[in-house]
Image (cartoon, coloured by chain):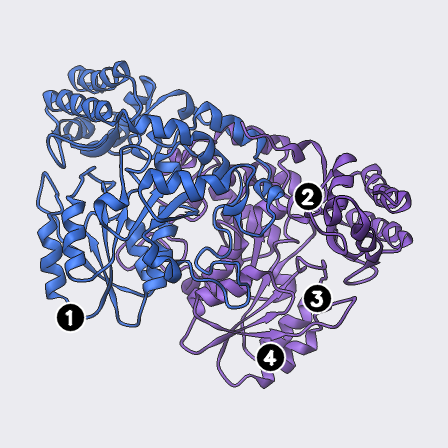
Chain colours: A purple, B blue
Amino acid sequence: MFERKARKMINVDPLQTGGKLTEDARKALIEWGDGYSVCDYCLTGRIEEIKNPPVYEFVHEKLPKFIGCDVVRLTTGAREGIFAVMNSLAKKDALVVLDSNAHYSSYLAAERAKLKIVEVPKTDYPEYKILSEKYAEVIENVKSEIVLALVTYPDGNYGNLPDVKRIAKICKNYNIPLLVNAAYSIGRMPVSLKEIGADFIVGSGHKSMASCGPIGVLGMSSEWENIVLRRSEKFKNKEVEMLGCAARGAPLVTLIASFPHVVERVKRWDEEVAKAREFSRRMEEIGFVQLGEKPHNHDLMAFHAEKLYEMSKKAKKGRFFLYQELSKRGIHGIKPGLTRFFKVSTYGLTWDEVYYVAGAFSEIVGNGIN
Amino acid sequence: MFERKARKMINVDPLQTGGKLTEDARKALIEWGDGYSVCDYCLTGRIEEIKNPPVYEFVHEKLPKFIGCDVVRLTTGAREGIFAVMNSLAKKDALVVLDSNAHYSSYLAAERAKLKIVEVPKTDYPEYKILSEKYAEVIENVKSEIVLALVTYPDGNYGNLPDVKRIAKICKNYNIPLLVNAAYSIGRMPVSLKEIGADFIVGSGHKSMASCGPIGVLGMSSEWENIVLRRSEKFKNKEVEMLGCAARGAPLVTLIASFPHVVERVKRWDEEVAKAREFSRRMEEIGFVQLGEKPHNHDLMAFHAEKLYEMSKKAKKGRFFLYQELSKRGIHGIKPGLTRFFKVSTYGLTWDEVYYVAGAFSEIVGNGIN
């Protein structure tokens, strides 16, 4: 079998820290691993109505409460939820407003829905912030119809958390629905669509809800239900944007199995932020610059490490030296070849692991490794 | 944990018989269960270029050879592959031609892509066949532009295998691209897009390739690559219809792990057909009518069982008696409440299991169970 060496290492890849399965999810995976297993107990042809495993309760009660939505659906990922909304709202020659820190898949979703894109700019190095008032400026300047605005909360490059409540107010003033991409927040930190005051929210099971990919959640306020979850003309119990049932199989069961743990861990968010800040402090002591908001409010952090870049020019392994040095120390998750700019997440690490990873960087720089 | 009782039973649900994991896939599932695990080894931002696990070789060499395609991509299921093609080809006021045995999700994919639908009719009870010449008739009668024709091979209601080669020739004559929905054939029986002479083919990992859902394959001839796999304007290495990477996570690794076994089992297709025919013969001996093609050419079979329906009227449990009687005998997969019409698949059952399941029906009818 193909081995996954990283499984036994400390993984600091932001893509991975929130997606690690709980023990309950791992057991569920074995029990429900076969193909379409969940459909064994489908009576109505709608996955979210299955009572065992308890999909119905999860989709109609637990999840809406957890993320503060009137209506929730399961998707095969956050990006697929974004596309479903965009495709439902798409009109000829219309456009969407995206923050310029948006995930690449938000751009692709718009392209796929044949929508034009206008970007909300970010501030310069080193913070790269999305300022809420820029939404108003951009919207004012656009001549075509805007069918949707999107804000990434936080973004996957710097872990910045824009002021979503203010952005929601601005969009409401212009009567433009707002989608919050919470792929890196739902399941890590407390998030509520109702509190934010936006129209749509998407989350990612594999990124932040301790689930086997691909799976995501799409939440919305009830006014959008008839548009985004419109039914097929011929098959009256099937939703067009979901192509019937979107998430099917074991990933869904892992999402449900991990959920009680996810609900609990979200309550410990303050400590995760504290860990991230301590890590950032130690990294800056080495001489690296933490990019994005400071003090930082999320476990996803980007660093500018000029020192490592200088070292890579002289290292035997060249730009791969950092990956190698970290691997030697049992640390995975910095993309091979990166030295000058890289991302790290401390989510779910113990304090000792946080110190250990920061210590490893310090050691690598101090050693002047070759 | 949520138990899946059906896991220990003989499962004759056509949705499940081809999706049962191999032992290798089960091991892979544990090793790669975490969230986005496969992305640990991504260097280029394109999932199909990952070398470990061997996704690159699988997508660019093994799969194209196996299903006779120039180009293959991974999707989150057959339906998502169908939608990607339809959305790429969609034009205002255009339509798609669907066989009237098409899966509901083919209709939904067309609706989602804002395409109109025209149906190729089927023959009457009991065969419900799609005759190739009907494609020509339908195409002749349509006034609007047809951007795609689709044929379901076999369909999921009766397990009928239309003459796809002839249908492909007809569509070629009219210069209409043809998509073959092979969700119930790729991974069960030999299928080659090149031999068929069509343009697109989709398969399902969870339905027919011994994989954890949701995962599918989309194959095409090279002339369509630039259209269906067009790149994003801003992110030049990302494919719009895939939203970047479509299938991500453990289902992909199970697909790869099961693949050598799937290649082998396809060679034993004749025996699977023999089992299905023997099962059908025994069911007809009881007095049931096998619907669809006869002699049957696929493991997916539908039956008309008037006797069971009559019994259900008098049974204590009413229309749920059949489900209960089969459950008692360790057999799962007939939807609870069905008696008059139901589907069965004998795929992967041992001969003894085939006799046992037919015997159970015989016993239930013979007993005049109450």
Disc 4/disc 1 C-alpha distance (Å): 46 Å
Q: Are marks 3 and 2 in contact (CB under 8 Å)?
A: no
- Determine which of the numbered discs, if any, sits on residue A17 in the image: 2
Residue occupying image coordinates x 37% and y 48%: B218
Q: Is residue B214 visible?
A: no
* Residue type of the residue flagged with mark 1: Lys
Residue picked out by circle 4: A173
Residue occupying image coordinates x 15% and y 70%: B143
**Front: mark 4 or 1:** 1
Disc 3/disc 4 C-alpha distance (Å): 18 Å
* Residue type of the residue flagged with mark 4: Asn
- Callout 2: chain: A
Instruction: Please check whether the numbered discs 4 and 1 fall on a single chain.
Output: no
* Residue type of the residue flagged with mark 2: Thr
- Determine which of the numbered discs, if any, sits on residue B143 in the image: 1
Closer to the camera in the image, A328 or B203: A328
| Residue B98 location (% of width, % of height) | 22, 55
| Residue A271 location (% of width, % of height) | 80, 47
The N terminus of chain B is located in which quarter? Answer: top right
Q: Quadrant of residue A52?
A: top left
The C terminus of chain B is located in which quarter? Answer: top left
Residue picked out by circle 3: A162
- Callout 3: chain: A
| Residue B288 location (% of width, % of height) | 12, 27
Q: Is residue A289 above or below residue A56?
A: below
Closer to the camera in the image, A339 or A287: A339
* Residue type of the residue flagged with mark 3: Pro
- Determine which of the numbered discs, if any, sits on residue B97 in the image: none
